[in-house]
Structure formats: structure tokens, C-alpha cells
Image: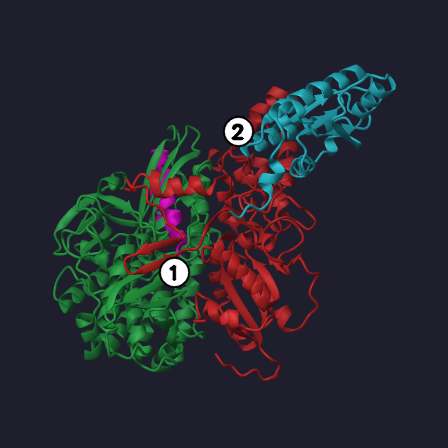
Chain colours: A cyan, B green, C red
């Protein structure tokens, strides 16, 4: 079952670094797993925990967040805020019984196309290994 | 075989129903009191910080949240291995006395008084607080509302949130009292004492001077010879906040006196498949069924049982009333269920007097509100008297004080078996072949239940004060033959 | 209670009912004190188990839409709660989810961290004072010598009222502050225009911070978070600035910041500001932003001191939030 399961991963990428890095992977014709759905935000600091939780609730098997490397944020501090929220979010989702491997944060710069491809492949396998998420089904109002 | 279903029971906090089974002769075979609800506090407190649990357990009950808060606060103290400093302890007691004043006033005037002041078989339209007011005057009705409101204002001042109080923290309280606030409470407490004295006088003039009512109390089908339980201080006087739990047998002999952390040696709980509520009983005596007597582990935890187990009241006026009650009713212990109402008023007076004592205590405005917490949290039990019975909270925590397990025995729960038995006795005496089950009969069945003050005091004064009942008479095919309603 | 209404305007037919509740919301209705006269002059209470004798059967016999206003408090925990919620939806013109439990799930909603099996096991078998060698459990149907006895089915999941029926309005709070209820009630009686269906009423749009009297500054960065008893609260400074988690910024005002007045930090019973779907997520975002660290290890040390995030940020709103129960 695991072998045939294609994870659905939602990826939030910041405009200035990580989205550009992903773009570079594309223009460089680097092949990588097609399992991610990219949503571009201006800064990783824009990412509200609600986006992550909603992604899981709507059926995502994994959520990936990418931002600029520490010190390089276009808005100075946004990525640090993202990092702090990410740590608290991990503690929370684990308390709710969601595997920590389904949520991941990595820094990707505008020139790191190869690294982005590698990251996506890695995460896809990681989530494939965890199996399909049952979050959506469990969260539906179960009366019985 | 006939079956009467009373669903839902009204005039209490929560859901409940009664099933009365009669044989073909119209005699009552058995009565089942079913509690159809469960929420699972003992499970979902796991994983919560222990000081947060003190604010979560107030939501077990919106009428006696202060009781849960106190039991929980004491358990949290024990978890950290500390005692609150004197000022903090006195502030908790001051809050607690106001909590008792508000609840006992509301129960007596709205629920109990109609039966006695107006009469158990009086026309139902009069058997409510309006009827009481008509008999005793509007001034008193306004005074009842006022005293209840004042007691709640004291609760809000000391406790923050008026209903779901937040005052306790492990080893202390969060808020102190200023001198101005103290003076104000002292004045209000004097008002409580006067009102409690007045209430007892009302009870005396209207009930005790009336032979019919005294007869109902002493000779009606409202008597259970069972064990009594209550908290007593080191002088064996009634105490709501602290002390040891004392249990006496139906003859008044001490069965045990245990400290909070010993409760499991003496109390066990039983499960029946037809109700969600468990049945506590005395472990060393054992569960022998829904029966009375020294050999049965059934017990009551009520204002009456509290007075039964104690050697007296800790304040002078209340103690004089205590002695008067036992003299009138023929010695200790008293098993007449309806005497609970009298005991409740004596407790009201004690709560008022003690409230005044505390308001006058120089330490009450002290600044030391919090004990130092330097031991690793582990495990603790807190026991207080709720208005409706002995309340036990037991928590186990990890090293950070996060609760890993919780065990709670609630006030009214203690009386689960006794309530079943009281209802059965009353029904058996009142519902017989040839008897027309009318409104008066129904009310008298209820009186067995109402005396326990099951968790909700309805303080309304312009809504009907009777406990409504519908009794369906069914034939053996379960068709309804007749319905008798009492509004 | 036949109080004559001088205006000959028909009295509002009103009902108050409880699901998985504690009684505190009914107490909040009774705490109208003197205003009770105004209430009774304007409304006929037709169903209120705590005070009246109306039975479920009587409600079933009412025509649909017979009740003008129903305040439903308590969460939906079992089959009886669900059945009556659906019944009252049919019989009521306006159905209000009254109080935190009906609004967001409330404290009984914390049971969504667990399951029916785990709860029953704990309460009826594992409880340290319970003696039950036969592992007896309450049954929906049970045969006794005299006949069959019935109990409602206990569901695995706690739900908000809105997750079971169509709700017209929400009045938040645990319980709602009585003055807010009176304001809403008077507005309805006077026939004032009500906000759009589905709105939260009886609460302010601004957060607790707007009304809270504690001193606030812009300095909200903290090096660690504390449990309330780990700090010597000065009674004056914003809790957050002292490193104590307070849900005030993500919670509507309207209660008069009553817990904070008692020197306890807000735990969010009044629910989120308008347009926020998940109050816990917003508060977590704010709390995390406050962490005065940028290195992952330092940040993790701070997060390690935030105990029980799910139970803190979703104290009253678990069933109504996005991750509405623990994974099973």
C-alpha cells in the first residue's frame, strides 16, 4: 500500500528566496518529485499556523515551509518569527497525535535550486513512509 | 406489572429520570433512579497543569463551582507538599462561607420552604416561592434575593470570576483583601447572621410549631437508617473547608475518621449498568445492596449527616440551634430525611457566623498569600464539604505538576444509593392499590428527593416553584392508560 | 406565570435547555436579579428543565417554529443532547448557542483528547476508588428483573451545537456575563434589527486587552514563559509581559475581564474576535512571536516551558477548532 501511495504535500514558499530557488530548479530542468503543491507567500513570516492546520484538515499528507536563510530575510526578521512559530506548532501537532515528520521547515536561498529538488524528494519519501494522513477523516464529526 | 416513568427530573443540576415498577396489585416493586449523563472529567484532566485543573473542575457544576475549586486547590497544595499561609487559608474560608450562604439560602427558600410554609398538599399554584412570599410578605422575598446577591458579590470580589472562581493557586490565593474591602464584608456578614437567625425563626414558627409538619418529618415515609459522613475539625465540630472525614453508624457510633489521603481505605465505588453515576459505599462494611442498617455500606453525606457525625457547631449561635434540633428530634443521630432542611439552616447560621469571625480576623488583610513551592510535585488529595456532601479530589502529577491521573468523588454522588432508597420508600408508602395518584401524592414522593438538595438551587422567585412531574400509568402492553400531571 | 403585558404585544415564547452542561449558564440567566421582572414581563418561558415541568413530549407536540427564542447551552455529548438539539431547532424561530460549550465545545470538549473507550475505562474500571471486578459498564439498554431500562448513547466525539444543527446566533462565555444577555434580550424584545444570521452577539468585537486595566507596554519579548505560580505577579503588569500566557489578545471582551480581576490570566472562554476561524492558532502565533530568541536550540528551550499547548490554547474551543480532536 505504501509503495502506491502518492503523498500530497502543500508547500509554502517565500517570494524572495525559496520560491525563486524552486523556480531555479525548474529552469535548470532538474527533475524532482511532483508531489508538492506550492503556495507563494511574500515572507515565511506571513505563515499563520492556521494555514498549516487547514492544509492538514483539508487532506494534505505533509506540509513544507521554506524561507530565507537566517540573516537573509528580505524583511529582516520574518524568517525568525516563522522559526519560532514552527517550534511551537510542532509541539502542538505532536500533542494532537500528528507525526512530526509531516511538518517540515527548511531554509532555501534563491540560488539553491538543486537543494530544493533534493528537499522535495526527501520529504516526499519521508511522508510516503509515514503513510496517508487520516487527519481529515478523523476530524470529521464522528458521532459514534 | 405497571410502570411509571418520570422523565426528566427537573429542579436539579443535570439530567435524571425515575422508573417506578409496580406489580399487579398496584404495590411498588422497585424504583430505579437513572442518571443519563457523563462527561469524563476524570479522564480529560490528564495532561493539564494542576493549577489549571482547579479552574477546569469548577465546570463540573455551575452551582457549587466554589466547592470543586476548594477541593482542587487543596489537592494542588498537597501535590506540592505545602500548606497555604494563614491569610491565604482564611481568605479561602471566607470565600467558602459566602458560597455556602448563597447556596443554602437559595435552596431553602426556593425549594424547601414551599412545602413547609405553604404546605405539602396545598394547591400547587401556591406551592412555590410566590406562595411563600404571600404568606410571609414581599419584604422577605426581596431580602432573599438581596442576601443571595450580596453573597455572590463577595464571591466575585475574592474569586475574580463570580461563578467559575479563579482565586486558588497551589499553596495560596491570587488576591488579597484591602481594609476597605474587609470592612464592607464585615458589614455584609452581619447581615448574613441576622438573615440566618430570621430563617431559623421562620422555620420554627411555621414548621416546628405546626403539629402536622412535625408529624410528617418524624412519621412520614422519609427515614433511612444508614451511616452518616461529614468533615470535622480537631474538636469534632462541623467544618466545611478542612479537617478529617468522620463516619458514624446508624446508632451514632464512630465507624472511622480518616485524613484525606486515606480515603480509599474507607470508601469504594460501585458500577451499575443502568446509570452513568457510580455508587460510593463504605468499603469496610461492604456493599450489601440498596438496604439500610449497620451491615450495609450505604451512607449519606448531607447537612444532616454532617451534624450527625459532629459533636457540635464551632460557633455559638449555630451550636445552640444544633442542640435544640437534637433535643426536639429525640437525640443523635437523626435519620429523618426531612430534617436535612433544618440542618441546612443551622449550617447557614454557622457559615454566616464564621464569615463574620473571619472578616474580623486581623490576619485576613495580611500580605502573605502564597507558600513557597520548592518541592517536586507528585500526588495530593483535597477534601471539602460541598453543600451537597463530602467532595474528594485526588491528583497524581509528573515532575512538572502536569496531571497524569485524577480521581474525583463528588458530593451528590455519595448520596446516589440513599436517593434511590429514599425514593423507593416514599413511592412504596404513597403509591398503593386504590390510591389515586394525585398532585399531593406526587409532591410527597418528591419531598424524599428534594431534601438532598441535588446540585442545583433554583433561586427564581416568579417561576413556579414546584418540581414538575408527569406520571404515566401503563398497562402491561406499555399503552398509556392515564397521565397525571403536576405543573 | 401570567404577567399582563400592558402593550398587548404578544410575549416572547422562550426556552432554555442544556446539553452536556454544568448549570452555570442557567445560573447566568437567573443572575439577572432585578431585571428578572423585565424578563418575565416580556417573555413566557415554555421549556426549561431546571425550572419548569415541560416535558420532551410537550415540546414534540408544539408546532414547528412555536418557540420564538431558544437558548441552548451545553455541548452535544450523547444521543439525548443531539435529539433535543434537533427537536428544538425544528420548534424554534431563533436558536442561540448560549455559552462556550454550545458555541465552541467548552470544557466538556476537552474529552476530545480522549475516546469513549478510554473515558469509560478510566471512570468505570481504572478509577482508584472504584471496585468493579466484573468490568460492568453503563449500557444504552439493560434488562432488570422488572423490565428494560434505557440510557442515552455516549458518543466518541463532543460536538458544538453548530456542528449538529443550524444555529442563528452565538452568545459566548463560560458562562456569558449576565449583563450581555440582558442587552441581547432587550434588543430582541424591542424588535431591534439583529445582526446577520450566524453572528456572535452579546460580546464586544475588540479583544480583552481593550478593557483590561493592567499596564501594557510595547515590550512583549520574553526569554521564557512561566506557569502562573512561578512568578510573583505584581497585580498590575500585563501577564504576557511577565511571561505568563494569557489569551486576552485572541479573546473577545464583554465579560469585564473577570478572571484577570481575580489575578488569573485569561483562558479564552469568550472565543475569538470576528472573522477568526481558529482562536488557538492565532494565539500560538502571537505567543511564538514573543519568544526572544533566534537560534533553534534556544527557541526549543523556551517552547519546552510552554506546557500543554493544546489544552491551553484550545481550553474552551477544541471541538470547534481546525484540529478538533486528538488523532486516534
Q: Chain of mark 1?
A: B
Q: Quadrant of the N terminus of chain B?
A: bottom left
Q: Quadrant of the C terminus of chain B?
A: bottom left
Above/below status of B83 relative to B441: above
Residue B82 highlighted magenta (yes or no) = yes
Question: Is residue B47 shown left or right of residue C89?
Answer: left
Q: Which residue is mark 1?
A: B16
Instruction: Inspect this view and state whether residue B328 appears.
Output: yes
Above/below status of C202 relative to B206: above
Tell which residue pokes out farthest to the front in this image: B477
Instruction: Inspect this view and state whether residue B368 appears.
Output: no
Question: Is residue B323 shown left or right of residue B427?
Answer: left
- Look at the image and give the residue range highlighted in magenta: B64-91
Residue B355 screen position, x and y as percent: 33, 57
Dominant secondary structure, magenta:
helix
Residue C158 screen position, x and y as percent: 52, 48
Question: Is residue B330 shown left or right of residue B19?
Answer: left
Q: In the picture, residue B381 is in which quadrant?
A: top left
Q: Which residue is mark 2?
A: C305
Above/below status of B256 relative to B357: above
Residue B373 highlighted magenta (yes or no) = no
Q: In the picture, residue C281 is in which quadrant?
A: top right
Q: Dot 1, how many residues are within 10 Å of its Cα: few (below 14), some (14-19), or many (20+)?
A: some
Residue at image coords 67%, 20%: A125
Q: How far apart in space, not on screen, are marks 2 and 1 (Cα)?
A: 43 Å
Residue contact between numbered discs 2 and 1, judged by CB atoms under 8 Å? no
Number of numbered markers: 2
Q: Chain of mark 2?
A: C
Instruction: For mark 1, give the secondary structure.
Output: loop
Residue B320 screen position, x and y as percent: 19, 64
Tell which residue pokes out farthest to the top in this image: A114
Respond whether the residues carrying marks 2 and 1 are from the same subunit.
Answer: no
Amino acid at each position: 500500500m505504501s509503495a502506491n501511495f502518492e503523498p500530497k504535500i502543500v508547500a509554502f514558499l517565500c517570494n524572495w528566496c525559496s520560491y525563486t530557488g524552486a523556480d531555479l530548479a525548474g529552469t535548470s530542468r532538474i527533475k524532482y518529485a511532483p508531489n508538492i503543491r506550492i503556495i507563494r507567500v511574500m515572507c515565511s513570516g506571513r505563515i499563520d499556523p492556521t494555514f498549516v492546520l487547514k492544509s492538514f484538515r483539508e487532506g494534505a499528507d505533509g506540509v513544507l515551509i521554506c524561507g530565507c536563510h537566517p540573516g537573509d530575510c528580505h524583511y529582516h526578521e520574518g524568517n525568525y518569527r516563522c522559526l519560532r512559530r514552527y517550534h511551537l506548532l510542532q509541539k502542538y501537532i505532536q500533542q494532537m497525535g500528528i507525526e512530526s515528520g509531516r511538518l517540515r521547515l527548511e531554509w532555501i536561498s534563491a540560488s539553491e535550486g538543486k537543494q530544493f529538488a533534493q528537499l522535495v524528494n526527501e520529504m516526499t519519501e519521508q511522508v510516503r513512509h509515514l503513510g496517508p494522513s487520516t487527519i481529515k477523516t478523523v476530524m470529521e464529526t464522528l458521532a459514534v | 406489572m405497571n410502570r411509571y416513568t418520570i422523565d426528566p427530573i427537573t429542579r436539579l443540576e443535570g439530567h435524571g429520570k425515575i422508573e417506578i415498577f409496580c406489580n399487579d396489585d398496584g404495590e411498588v416493586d422497585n424504583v430505579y433512579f437513572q442518571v443519563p449523563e457523563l462527561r469524563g472529567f476524570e479522564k480529560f484532566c490528564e495532561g493539564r497543569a494542576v493549577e489549571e485543573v482547579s479552574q477546569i473542575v469548577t465546570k463540573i457544576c455551575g452551582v457549587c463551582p466554589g466547592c470543586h475549586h476548594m477541593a482542587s486547590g487543596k489537592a494542588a497544595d498537597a501535590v506540592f507538599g505545602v500548606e497555604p499561609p494563614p491569610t491565604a487559608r482564611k481568605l479561602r474560608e471566607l470565600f467558602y462561607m459566602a458560597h455556602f450562604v448563597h447556596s443554602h439560602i437559595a435552596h431553602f427558600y426556593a425549594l424547601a420552604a414551599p412545602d413547609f410554609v405553604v404546605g405539602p398538599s396545598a394547591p400547587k399554584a401556591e406551592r412555590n416561592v410566590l406562595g411563600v412570599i404571600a404568606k410571609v410578605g414581599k419584604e422577605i422575598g426581596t431580602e432573599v434575593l438581596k442576601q443571595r446577591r450580596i453573597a455572590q458579590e463577595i464571591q466575585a470580589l475574592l474569586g475574580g470570576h463570580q461563578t467559575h472562581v479563579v482565586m486558588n493557586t497551589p499553596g495560596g490565593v491570587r488576591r488579597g483583601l484591602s481594609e476597605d474591602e474587609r470592612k464592607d464584608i464585615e458589614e455584609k456578614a452581619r447581615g448574613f447572621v441576622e438573615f440566618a437567625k430570621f430563617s431559623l425563626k421562620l422555620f420554627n414558627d411555621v414548621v416546628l410549631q405546626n403539629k402536622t409538619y412535625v408529624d410528617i418529618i418524624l412519621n412520614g415515609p422519609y427515614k433511612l437508617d444508614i451511616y452518616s459522613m461529614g468533615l470535622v475539625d480537631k474538636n469534632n465540630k462541623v467544618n466545611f473547608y478542612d479537617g478529617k472525614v468522620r463516619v458514624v453508624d446508624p446508632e451514632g457510633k464512630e465507624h472511622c475518621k480518616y485524613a484525606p489521603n486515606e480515603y480509599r481505605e474507607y470508601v469504594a465505588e460501585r458500577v451499575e449498568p443502568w446509570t452513568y453515576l457510580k455508587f460510593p459505599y463504605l468499603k469496610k462494611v461492604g456493599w450489601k445492596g440498596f438496604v439500610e442498617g449497620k451491615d450495609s455500606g450505604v451512607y449519606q453525606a448531607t447537612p444532616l449527616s454532617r451534624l450527625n457525625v459532629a459533636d457540635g457547631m464551632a460557633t455559638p449561635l449555630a451550636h445552640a440551634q444544633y442542640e435544640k434540633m437534637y433535643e426536639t428530634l429525640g437525640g443523635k443521630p437523626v435519620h429523618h430525611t426531612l430534617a436535612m432542611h433544618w440542618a441546612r439552616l443551622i449550617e447557614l447560621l454557622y457559615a454566616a457566623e464564621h464569615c463574620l469571625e473571619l472578616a474580623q480576623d486581623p490576619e485576613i488583610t495580611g500580605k502573605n498569600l502564597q507558600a513557597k513551592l520548592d518541592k517536586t510535585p507528585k500526588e495530593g488529595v483535597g477534601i471539602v464539604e460541598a453543600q451537597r456532601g463530602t467532595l474528594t479530589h485526588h491528583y497524581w502529577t509528573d515532575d512538572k505538576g502536569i496531571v497524569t491521573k485524577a480521581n474525583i468523588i463528588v458530593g451528590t454522588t455519595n448520596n446516589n444509593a440513599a436517593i434511590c432508597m429514599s425514593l423507593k420508600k416514599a413511592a412504596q408508602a404513597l403509591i398503593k392499590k386504590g390510591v389515586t395518584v394525585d398532585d399531593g401524592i406526587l409532591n410527597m414522593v418528591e419531598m424524599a428527593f428534594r431534601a438532598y438538595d441535588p446540585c442545583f438551587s433554583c433561586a427564581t422567585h416568579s417561576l413556579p416553584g414546584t418540581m414538575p412531574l408527569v406520571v404515566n400509568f401503563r398497562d402491561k402492553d406499555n399503552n398509556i392508560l392515564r397521565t397525571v400531571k403536576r405543573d | 406565570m401570567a404577567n399582563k403585558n400592558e402593550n398587548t404585544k404578544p410575549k416572547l415564547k422562550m426556552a432554555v435547555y442544556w446539553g452536556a452542561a454544568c448549570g452555570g449558564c442557567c445560573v447566568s440567566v437567573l443572575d439577572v436579579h432585578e431585571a428578572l421582572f423585565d424578563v418575565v414581563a416580556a417573555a413566557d418561558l415554555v421549556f426549561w428543565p431546571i425550572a419548569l415541568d415541560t416535558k420532551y413530549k410537550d415540546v414534540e407536540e408544539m408546532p414547528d417554529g412555536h418557540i420564538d427564542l431558544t437558548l441552548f447551552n451545553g455541548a452535544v455529548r450523547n444521543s439525548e443532547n443531539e435529539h433535543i438539539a434537533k427537536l428544538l431547532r425544528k420548534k424554534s424561530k431563533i436558536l442561540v448557542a448560549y455559552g462556550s460549550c454550545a458555541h465552541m465545545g467548552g470544557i466538556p470538549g476537552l474529552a476530545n483528547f480522549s475516546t469513549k473507550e478510554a473515558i469509560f475505562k478510566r471512570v468505570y474500571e481504572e478509577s482508584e476508588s472504584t471496585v468493579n471486578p466484573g468490568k460492568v459498564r453503563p449500557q444504552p439498554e439493560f434488562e432488570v428483573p422488572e423490565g428494560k431500562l434505557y440510557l442515552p448513547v455516549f458518543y466518541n466525539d463532543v460536538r458544538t451545537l453548530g456542528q449538529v444543527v443550524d444555529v442563528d446566533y452565538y452568545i459566548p462565555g463560560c458562562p456569558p456575563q449576565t449583563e450581555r444577555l440582558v442587552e441581547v434580550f432587550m434588543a430582541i424584545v424591542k424588535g431591534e434589527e439583529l445582526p446577520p444570521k450566524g453572528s456572535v452577539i452579546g460580546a464586544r468585537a475588540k479583544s480583552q486587552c481593550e478593557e483590561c486595566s493592567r499596564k501594557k507596554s510595547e515590550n512583549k519579548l520574553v526569554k521564557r514563559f512561566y506557569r502562573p505560580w512561578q512568578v510573583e505577579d505584581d497585580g498590575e503588569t500585563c501577564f504576557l509581559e511577565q511571561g505568563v500566557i494569557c489569551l486576552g489578545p485572541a479573546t473577545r471582551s464583554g465579560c469585564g475581564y473577570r478572571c484577570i480581576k481575580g489575578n488569573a490570566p485569561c483562558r479564552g472562554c469568550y472565543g475569538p474576535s470576528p472573522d477568526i476561524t481558529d482562536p488557538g492558532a492565532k494565539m500560538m502565533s502571537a505567543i511564538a512571536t514573543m519568544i526572544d530568541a533566534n537560534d533553534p536550540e534556544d527557541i526549543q528551550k523556551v517552547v519546552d516551558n510552554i506546557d500543554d499547548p493544546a489544552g491551553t490554547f484550545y481550553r474552551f474551543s477544541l471541538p470547534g477548532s481546525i484540529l478538533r480532536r486528538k488523532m486516534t
